[in-house]
Amino acid sequence: MKWIMLGLSIALTVAVPASAFQLRPEVKNGENLIDISDDVVWRRKMNAVGFWGIEQFTHPVHETITNRIYGCETDKACAITVGNSFMQPAAPMAVLAGVRWNDNPPFRLTDTSLSGCKNVYVQLPMEGSCWASVFSDGKKKATAEKGSVLYKYQPDKSEQYSMLLRSHFGDLQFLHAMASRPGERAGETYDNVMMWAQFVWRVTSSEYGRGTSISEASVKIPRLMDFFGLRETVQSIFFKGEAGYNKDYREFAFGTLLHMVQDSYSEAHMARHDPDGHGCEKTRYDSPGQAVKFYTYVGQDSKKHGLKDEMKEVTRQMTYTPTPNLIDVGKALRDMKDKHMKWEEVEPYFICLFRPESAMTEADRGPF
């Protein structure tokens, strides 16, 4: 399928299965959008890869959560994710773009039999046909492997195993606060989540710049070498083939962190206790509910998973979950960011947010 720009930016409304909440992929500043979610060919491809009715996904839930964190008061107002002369979303556009990145990272396949997809940068809404084909093929292979980490970093094939497949069916599922495979112990998932939180926070706080390499960052975060090439940089990881927000990389990085935290409040991603009223040690912030168990997307039913993706789930959490809920947690992180706190100062809060009740608890697909 060809996407014709004609000088306009194009957006699709589509949900990515392993996302805790729905998304609206957009290009650059997201202005002058054309909604092509009614395209018959696109809908057929999306349903073929296991989506559960694309017509359901017309609400940008991740973006709405983020806008609420930045002060929006109503779902209708906070659902506006496109800047124009009359209204702007509460969250900076770069933050919203970062929130989308976890589910829509740009990638390039250097070795593939998929027609028209070799050496092409793929990121929704561009190259949507390749995106759907890659996801469909990847899901089938992951299902056949029955839980082994099929998609993982390999130094000699750094681009062949795409970020899309790794983050949904492989070793990067921690980008969604999930385990990489059934049987992975909670302590390992926690270590991966904390690794990413530290890396991204050091970017957000300006300690790491766009040109900071994994080689340089691994001095303080050695675990990064298990997932990324030493020559990769902050820019090449976040903005491969697309430079829409690279000048606002700090805000963009913060958005990717918010996505992981928001995902951790989806019941399809992990189980939590309710907050107990205590504060987080070594911080001035209230303690979220303690992590109990991480799930893995491998083997989950996308329809059952998707029932936890809708806006009504977010509303339920905000209405019935004791504080701090997912909005409160996001506001706490924003407060730390605005105060220019260093990683060493915010680390206790992330420990409080993600440390599991038992490090030995093994991941599974849960009731999904």
Image: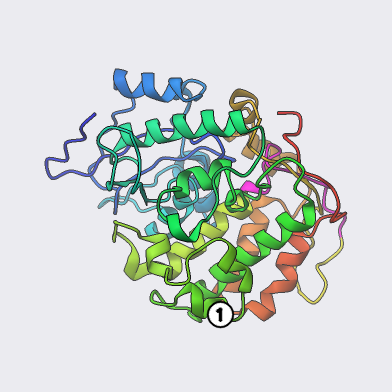
Q: Is residue 78 above or below residue 247?
A: above
Q: Is residue 283 above or below residue 144?
A: below
- Residue 55 visible (yes or no): no
Looking at the rendered structure, the kind of residue marked 1 is His
Residue visible at 41% across and 25% down in the picture:
46
The N terminus: image quadrant: top left
Residue visible at 58% across and 67% down in the picture:
224
Task: Give the residue pinned by disc 1.
Answer: 340
List x then y, in percent, for residue 336. Answer: 61, 73
Label 1 element class: loop
List x then y, in percent, for residue 151. Answer: 54, 45
Q: Is residue 155 above or below residue 12?
A: below
Side of 96 relative to 270 (left or right): left
Occupied quadrant, residue 321? top right
Q: In this view, does 334 lie above or below 130?
A: below
The kind of secondary structure the magenta stretch mainly shows is loop
The C terminus: image quadrant: top right
Is 271 in the magenta?
A: yes
List x then y, in percent, for residue 73. Answer: 54, 48
Q: Residue 196 or 154: which is nearer the viewer? A: 154
List x then y, in percent, for residue 289. Answer: 80, 53
Q: Residue 111 or 89: which is nearer the viewer? A: 111
Q: Residue lying farthest left?
A: 6
Side of 129 relative to 157 (left or right): left
Structural crowding at the residue carrying mark 1, measured as other residues with C-alpha within 10 Å and reported as few (<14), some (14–19) or many (≥20): few
- Residue 80 visible (yes or no): yes
Q: Residue lying farthest front?
A: 156
Please state the extent of the stretch shown in magenta in the rendering.
Answer: 263-277
